[in-house]
Image (spheres, rainbow, N blue to C red):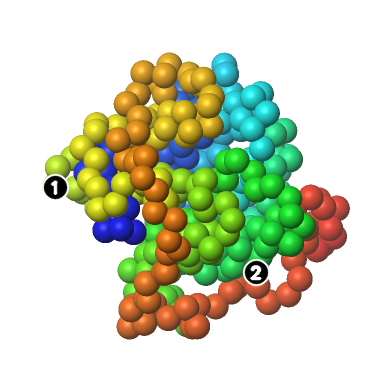
Amino acid sequence: MARRWSFSDNFYADSEVSVDGHHWLVGAYPNAWTESSLMAAYSDQKKDFRLGSAPGRLIFAGSDSSVHPEEQPQGGTIWHHLARHGIPFRNFGEGFELAGVDEGRALEPTGARFLTNVPMPEPLFRNTSREYPGFNMNVPDQYRASQFIREIEEKYVKTGADLPRFIFIHLPNDHMARARPEDGYPYEESFVADNDLALGRIVEYLSGTKWWKEMAVLVTEDDPQGGVDHIDAHRTVLLCVGPWCKSDYVSHTNSSFPGLLKTVFRLLGLPPLNLFDASAADLSDCFTSKPDFSPYKALEVDRRIFDPAEAKESKTAESPAMDDPGEIRRQRR
């Protein structure tokens, strides 16, 4: 994708970790509550504390990756911004990692069960897929890609309905986890290979639809924790993919997450959401007036690292629906 289209060598994450990164990506600059929050897991087996997720009891205090009521900026997030301006959108997996969420095994299709009642933005709740997983490392990104493709086929291709003008897709497995050979992940790097293939499959599918001629796909990570970069610890991935993106082009524009949002808003004809994206440098240099509409073919994965045929879904039985808390209570009894 980087060779065929555009990427940036001067794009930076405004975040330190996933929690504030997901806030920045939806236009919610993290406040003091978010930046001072702590999420720790206590492992009964090894008797130690670890940041992030680990087996055993979960001790939660403060924020999570999604925007909670006490963190909402004055103008809201991109979900409010899109709704205010009448832009149809569909969200796949973002914004539902709320306080107290259970992200264990056998929780497909959403990958989560909500044990506490946390208010969330009505536009996001209404326009989010109920058949797509959020952050849960027990769920292969291949499952996410398949769920996304299936929903687009059923809701838009087969019905002839218009595709929403904005689509947010969360593919979290490049976050990595401990190797699980029994589930098809023999190495930590296997999760990254899973993520790469899922992205390739999604772009391959989209490039074969009637909407491809009017599409741009912008790809980044939520934080720079993939390893300390030799230029700057916050430098991260930015790909600009699609028929209107320059071929084999490297952008040197200094930009970050607000600049990414500004690019999206300009493509949609929207005003700024807040001062951060209003003053940011956009990525307009990645686009061309001479499009190439030819489709994309996903590259084969190195099966020594990751074999999609071996990646196991964690679901073993029917799970309760996301919107049925009564069913959750009955199963917990």
Query: How many marks overall?
Result: 2
Query: In the rendered structure, which disc, 2 or 1, sits on the residue that comes first in sequence?
Result: 2
The quadrant in which the N terminus is found is bottom left
**Residue 121 visible in image:** no
Q: Quadrant of residue 24?
A: top left
46 or 204, nearer to the observer: 204
Neighbours of disc 1 within 10 Å: few (<14), some (14-19), many (20+)? few
The quadrant in which the C terminus is found is bottom right
Q: Which residue lies at the image location 53% right of the left edge and 59% below the top edge?
A: 206
Q: Which residue lies at the image location 14% right of the left edge and 42% below the top edge?
A: 231
Secondary structure of the residue carrying numbered label 2: loop
Q: Which residue lies at the image location 74% right of the left edge and 55% below the top edge?
A: 160
- Residue 100 on image: x %, y %: 62, 46
Neighbours of disc 2 within 10 Å: few (<14), some (14-19), many (20+)? some
User: Residue farthest to the left?
Assistant: 230
Q: Which residue is mark 2?
A: 106
Q: Residue 318, relative to residue 223: is it above or below?
A: below
205 or 226, nearer to the observer: 205
Q: Is residue 266 left or right of residue 70?
A: left
Q: Which residue is mark 1?
A: 230
- Residue 150 on image: x %, y %: 66, 65
Secondary structure of the residue carrying numbered label 1: loop
Q: Quadrant of residue 145?
A: bottom right
257 or 67, nearer to the observer: 257
- Residue 95 on image: x %, y %: 59, 42
Name the kind of residue labelled 2 in the image. Ala
Name the kind of residue labelled 1 in the image. His
